[in-house]
Image: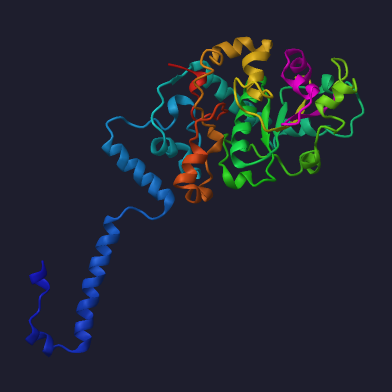
Amino acid sequence: MYHLFQISSDVLKTLGLKMKFMITFIFTSVLIGSIFLLSPPNNFNDQLLYATINGSKESKTPQDKLLGGLLTSDFDERSCVSRYYKSSLYRKPSPYKPSEYLISKLRSYEKLHKRCGPGTQAYKEATKNLIGHNDKNYANKTVGECKYIVWVAVYGLGNRILTLASVFLYALLTERVVLVDQSKDISDLFCEPFPGTSWLLPRDFPLTRQIDGYNKGYSRCYGTMLNNHAITANSTPPHLYLHILHDSRDEDKMFFCPKDQTLIDKVPCSYIHSGHFKLMDTTPPSVAQLLLSSIINYNESEMKLNLRKRVRDLPLNPTQSHPSSSNTEELHGSRLSSVSSPPLLISGSPLSSLETLAEK
């Protein structure tokens, strides 16, 4: 097309400076406009959608954004771009098919969280007397449908993701509602994982100010209460602190025993500091080991979820770990792949890749 724009030197001499500038400006504008129209979008959220749409055209196999039912479709897709589009961009399709029982457990949990989550009347009733109550048998009289496990962030980001996943799996089998301490900016890092409710621990939640100060010397630390013979089947407190860290005492590790779980199940609210998450480890046991080798009471659910059968096949990704839309661009690239898609040893759901809790 060069000849269309070629102008002889004789003609150029007759044109004024303004006319030459006008021709140059028009030509440059058309060229730049063409580049923008043909290039992919610059906004990162739109880039994900662009890549997904164009990638699906090139792929013969359509992407299953709900991962076989592990994820719910009850969210606005643009509220958290990484929730539905991350898998197709950063993960190979899973060889496992989720079991119907697992999917039903996840949907049941979502309903429980919506009924008992922050702001509900059930939440207010369940938490109003967690402190300042002198009745030693308080828990036995008041435990209803809404029981809570409060996850408190410790150590680095990787440990937080893994322990949060383990705690969710514990909540899934013990029918507790997971609440996440938001003092460590978790809300800026991850999207809300449950539809129609929140997993963030309200700032006015009882004992919120004391959470960071909890340690194994706390009077309502489970290990300390066992040492002091302060907790029995007939005398249970309204809340407990569970110290599952590197310096846990033998009494703290009793948390993993079936008899102790029966006792803890009577307590309406438990706070947990945990830094252990690996399965089948010989060093201090993880919350997950509780589920896989200790709790006899949950054998039926455990077998249906196939936890024992595929304990070695656990490349699980917690779908509560979807990067928030405001944080997705920052995490894009190597950081996003390391945060969102590590081969985790234990998971929770909304579990984005629950291979062990699924059937081939």
**Residue 76 appears in the picture as rendered:** no
Q: Is residue 168 above or below residue 83?
A: above
At 67% from the left edge and 45% from the top edge, which residue is drawn? 184
Q: How many marks?
A: 0
Q: Identify which residue is drawn at 23% across, 66% down.
A: 31
Residue 214 occupies which quadrant of the picture?
top right
Q: Is residue 280 left or right of residue 93?
A: right
- The residue under the point 61% across, 9% down is 300
Q: Quadrant of the C terminus?
A: top left
Residue at the spot 63% in from the left edge and 32% down from the top edge:
163
Question: At which x and y percent is residue 324?
Answer: 53, 45
Q: Percent position (x, y) of residue 204?
A: 76, 43
| Magenta-colored stretch includes residue 251 | yes
Q: Quick check: 74 left or right of 274? A: left
In the rendered structure, which segment of residues is drawn in magenta? Answer: 237-264
Check the image and report above or below for 35 versus 81: below
Q: Magenta stretch containing residue 205, yes or no? A: no
In this view, the residue in front, 138 or 39, is: 39
In this image, 15 relative to 311: left or right?
Answer: left
Could you tell whether 349 is left or right of 41 in the image?
right
Q: Position of residue 74 (x, y in %)?
A: 50, 34
Query: How is the protein colored in the picture?
Result: rainbow
Q: Residue furthest right?
A: 134
Q: Residue furthest front?
A: 282
